[in-house]
Image (cartoon, rainbow, N blue to C red):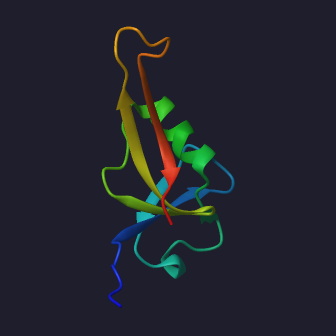
Amino acid sequence: MTTQTIEVKKVFVSVDNAAQWIVLEEEIQAGFNYKLASIEDLHDYVAATGEYFTYNVETAAGVAKWYTEEFSEESPLDYICEYRVIN
């Protein structure tokens, strides 16, 4: 049985100021003023900046990845863009 390695970066948000973000490989570098971001935090980041992380990110809910899907013209939805937990 082979195991697949998923490369991830940890994303932290400030406990005191949700507008302060850092991306680190090691949690100890973040310090006490930061917490591992949630999926909701990531969606807030996209809403505030218009940008998303192109790599897999470790969140409080697990490893997440940016997901997009476009629908046909007949669909009531045009597209879906969101972070989804993949592991």
Q: Is residue 40 above or below residue 71?
A: below
Q: Residue at x 52, y 77 (%)?
A: 27
In this rendering, the answer to whether 9 lies above or below 53 is: below
Q: Nearer the viewer, residue 86 or 9?
A: 86
Classify 39 as above or below 30: above
Give whichever of 50, 87 is nearer the camera. 87
Q: Residue at x 30, y 50 (%)?
A: 54
- From the top left corner, tell me how far across and down residue 30 is, in percent: 53, 71
For residue 41, above or below residue 55 = above
Residue 67: quadrant of the picture? top left
Q: Is residue 48 left or right of residue 32?
A: left
Nearer-the-camera pick, 1 or 50: 1
Q: Position of residue 79 (x, y in %)?
A: 41, 23
The quadrant of the image that shows the N terminus is bottom left
Q: Residue furthest bottom?
A: 1
Residue ID at (33%, 79%): 4
Residue 50 x/y as whole percent: 39, 30
Q: Is residue 66 left or right of residue 21?
A: left
Q: Is residue 17 left or right of residue 50?
A: right
How many marks the image carries: the answer is: 0
